Amino acid sequence: MADLGKLRQEYAASSLNRDSLAATPIDQFRSWFEQTVEAELHEPNAMTLSTVSPEGQPWNRTVLLKAFDEKGFVFFTNYNSRKAQHIAANPKVSLLLPWILLQRQVIIIGEAEKISSAESLKYFASRPYGSQVGAWVSQQSSVVSSRSVLAAKFQEI
């Protein structure tokens, strides 16, 4: 087995000083996010969403940040998914955006809430057709017994 201790790197490419911070946390996030886009990081909007099940078990998964402003950070999920069920039972969540190549990460802690139905429908309509079909035929977070079951559902559309 490899000696994982030897994988340690020094992170000294940038620093964080109060004098260089933006006026508000969201302005700082916006600035850093723009830097990730300019640096052409792969999936700069990929973030780890942490929830807790009703039994107290923490769960992590990667979701995509789709919007952000002073009101909050937006991601989408099926309302019947495991993450949606966790959030319904306990809305406290954590987000982690790991921008490793820029030697930076952002952690956001708060409570999740649903956006309006109109915003959800607008987003769904903006997805590529194949992605929409995939959402229709596959129940997120549920076990699929076979590929043929999905294919049959696809044929119904």
Image (cartoon, helix red, strand yellow):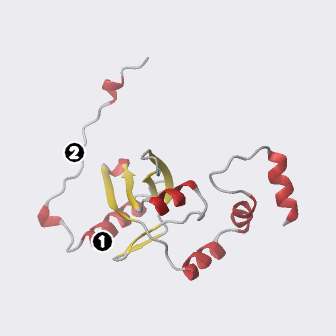
In the image, is 8 to the left or to the right of 139? left
Q: Quadrant of the N terminus?
A: top left
Pick the residue in front: 122 or 54: 54
In the image, is 66 to the left or to the right of 31? right
Give the CA distance from mark 2 to mark 1: 24 Å
Label 2 vs 1, first from the N-terminus: 2
**Image coordinates for residue 100, horizontal then vertical, percent:** 36, 47
Question: Which residue is tagged 1?
Answer: 26
Pick the residue in front: 105 or 35: 105
When the figure is inspected, residue 60 is found, relative to residue 127, above or below; the finding is: above
In the image, is 77 to the left or to the right of 31? right
Q: Residue at x 32, y 53 (%)?
A: 105
Q: Residue at x 86, y 55 (%)?
A: 152
Q: Quadrant of the C terminus?
A: bottom right
> Residue 99 — which label?
none
Question: Which residue is tagged 2?
Answer: 12
In the image, is 25 to the left or to the right of 65? left
Q: Amino acid at mark 1?
A: Ile
Label 1 element class? helix
Q: Residue furthest top?
A: 1
Q: Quadrant of residue 38?
A: bottom left
